[in-house]
Amino acid sequence: MTRKRSKNPRLEVRGSLWITADGESLGGHGRMALLRAVAEQGSITQAAKAFGMSYKAAWDAIDAMNRVAGEDLVERSAGGRGGGSTRLTEHGWRLLDRYAQIDAVHQRFVSLLTDEAFDLSQPFSVLNVLNLKTTARNQFIGTVTAMRSGAVNDEVELTLPGGTRLVAIVTRESVDALGLRTQQPAVALIQAANVVLATDIGQAKLSTRNQLHGTIRSIRPGAVNAEVSLDIDSGGQIVAIVTEASVRQMELAPGVRAAALIKAPDVILAAAT
């Protein structure tokens, strides 16, 4: 029988955390849970029973972890009147605690990916996925497609998914610190106050390197300044802060064609290092 296909299936990201040591497998959720069972039971035999596995399988896993980890994670003491015991070493406890901390971050990241990456009605924002906060209203994800070196500053060209190119002027030190190179993903951050709006520019030649043409989507008025949102022709939006006097003088309104002008030094680049 053919299963009926859902019209709006929920898309999710799945992932598991696994540790290696010099390329050899140390373990993931299962082995970490076994270590915790050993710590709670004080016995490999009892830990294996609580974990639902044979003693041999439990011991083989622990022996492999001890060998790969560089230091013993579990140690056994010879039995006296009360018999032998098994416990986690200090190194074992540190590994177990650190794994729990990293796994919590990993699960949070996977959850954010599911919430942000697969809402196909919204643009993807790596800053939202990383849960980063920034005062820059405008965030564009693209790929570094060209780099030109200068005596002090470098010129970096970022191509956005729709084909729009943004040029940023950054110091050589910043390029080195970010490890920028061609074909590397990067994020362009632009303060709304640094976006200049222009209308009816026609064939005028402007020194501003970045010119994003589009249509005004909305205007949010304020006491002194207004927030103008522009739908870019190639995709995406950009927000500009302009005075209320400029809104009236330029006759800005939803549906009006305009261009967002951004100077190259006002484009801030961010990249994962």
Image: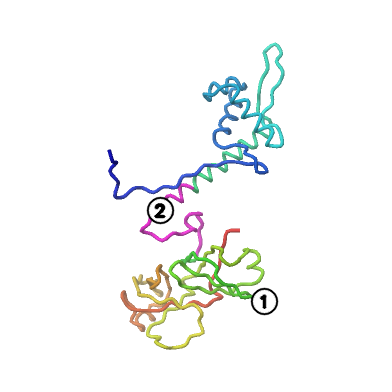
Which quadrant of the view contains residue 246? bottom left
Q: Nearer the viewer, residue 121 or 194?
A: 121
Q: Position of residue 173 (x, y in %)?
A: 66, 69
Q: Is residue 187 magenta?
A: no
Residue 22's x, y, as percent? Answer: 68, 43
Q: Which mark is residue 152?
A: 1
* Type of amino acid at the residue the image marks with label 1: Val
The residue at 66%/20% (across/down) is: 85
Quadrant position of the C terminus in the picture: bottom right
Q: Which residue is mark 2?
A: 118
Counting residues from the start of the chain, the first of labels 1 and 2 encountered is: 2
Q: Residue furthest top?
A: 81
Q: Is residue 161 visible?
A: yes
Q: Residue at x 32, y 78 (%)?
A: 256
Residue 56: image quadrant is: top right
Q: Is residue 243 left or right of residue 189?
A: left
Q: Residue at x 62, y 39 (%)?
A: 25
**Label 1: element kind:** loop
Vertical order, 224 against 133 (above or below): below
Range of the magenta residues? 110-135
Choose mark 1 or mark 2, whichever is in front: 2
Disc 2, SS: loop
Quadrant of the snapshot with the N terminus? top left
Measured along the vertical axis of the image, is residue 2 above or below residue 141?
above
Residue at the image point whose x is 51% and y is 62% from the top? 134
| Closest to the observer, 257 or 160 | 160
